[in-house]
Amino acid sequence: MGFIATIIALLSRDAEFYTTFIPVLTIGIIITIILAIYGKLKLKILKISAIVFISLCAVSIIAFEGYQAYEKSLEVISTQDVDLEEYRPFVENTKAVSLEEPPTFYIKENLPKLDGATALYPVYSAFVQAVYPEKEYPLWDSEVVSSQTGNAFDYLVKGAVDLIFIAKPSENQMNAAEQQGVELTLTPIGREAFVFFVHADNRVDTLTIEQIQGIYSGKITNWKEVGGKDEKIRAFQRPEGSGSQSALLSVMNGIPLMDPPTDDIVSTMGGIIKETTNYQNRTNAIGYSFRHFSQNMVDSGKIKYIAVEGILPTKENIQNETYPIVDSFYAITAGSNNPNIQGFLEWMQSEQGQEIVDRTGYVPVR
């Protein structure tokens, strides 16, 4: 039983403690049983020793599990993201930017159904505010919603929406669409930097792409290996299919990602920022997101952006193409028969559409 329990413990997240504890406990129990069989536990010293051993084992478990529960109580796994209500089109004091002149393209009827990533809602909300009729567009039940990258992509493939706004889909997503016979059309409408950040008190200021790949593949596990303190790296990730997770896979360039503990997978982009700054008040975390989202759409707290290959992810460094991790984001269609789609896409790439992209805080493709 002790052997089987040890094998099971090796597969658990608490293996370091239990693979030592279980064999010691097993040997102690075997010795106690042998002594009991031969009547030796009647001796006072052996009886006291057995009681002390069992008590120490019980105290050890209670202390270990109590500390684990204490650590877990300090974690704040975020479920709240940015308040997109502030960017809804046509609402009073909306943060969505407005054109200062009449649009050169306008949609009166057959409104395309839009969905997309949280980080890009301000862009396509502003598009809507420019060319759609003025009315209410509730976030979860209208022609203009935001259900995050993975859900938006699924809805597009199923034909529930006409157009989505996300970063480049992952290879798995593209393959899934192909297997369902769906042909995707990706129209670039802006560019953005993929950024990595740490707690402001982390002494590491710059990483190479090779070092980032080492951290997220599990090859580099301690900050001292990249010029930081002697502490274990806590590398947060996003769920499979999210825009930022797809961007991370692109950075890895085929190198397999390590499997993170469940607690290190954060459901929202705002959550990964909050976790990196707040996780147990430690400075050992690293996370990633997109530049504009992390700088302007959420309370970024005490994060510090990592200079990749010595270059910080500023808007200027995206424009002059010196920051090494920059990619386009897209308006994606999947064979919609809505008659306004093509004109809408062409307008997004026009001077007015690109002005909205620029004033929202992203980098235009033109």
Image (cartoon, helix red, strand yellow):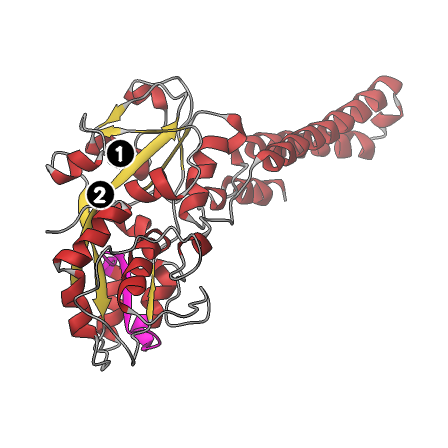
* Residue 81 higher or lower than 21, as above or below: below
Q: Is residue 71 left or right of residue 46?
A: left
Nearer-the-camera pick, 205 or 44: 205
Disc with the residue nearer the chain's start (1 vs 2): 1
Where is residue 31 drawn, in percent x and y?
72, 29
Nearer-the-camera pick, 39 or 279: 279
Where is residue 208 drawn, in percent x and y?
20, 29
Q: Residue at x 16, y 72 (%)?
A: 343
Q: Which mark is residue 251?
A: 2
Question: The disc labelled 1 sits on which kind of residue?
Answer: Ile
Q: Residue at x 16, y 73 (%)?
A: 342
Q: Which residues are magenta?
A: 156-171
Q: Residue at x 45, y 46 (%)?
A: 266
Packing grade of label 1 (10 A; few <14, some 14-19, many >=20) is many
Find residue 155 and report its image quarter.
bottom left
Q: In terms of secondary structure, where does tag 1 sit?
A: helix
Question: The disc labelled 2 sits on which kind of residue?
Answer: Val
Q: Which residue is mark 1?
A: 212
Nearer-the-camera pick, 271 or 32: 271
Q: Is residue 291 left or right of residue 39?
A: left
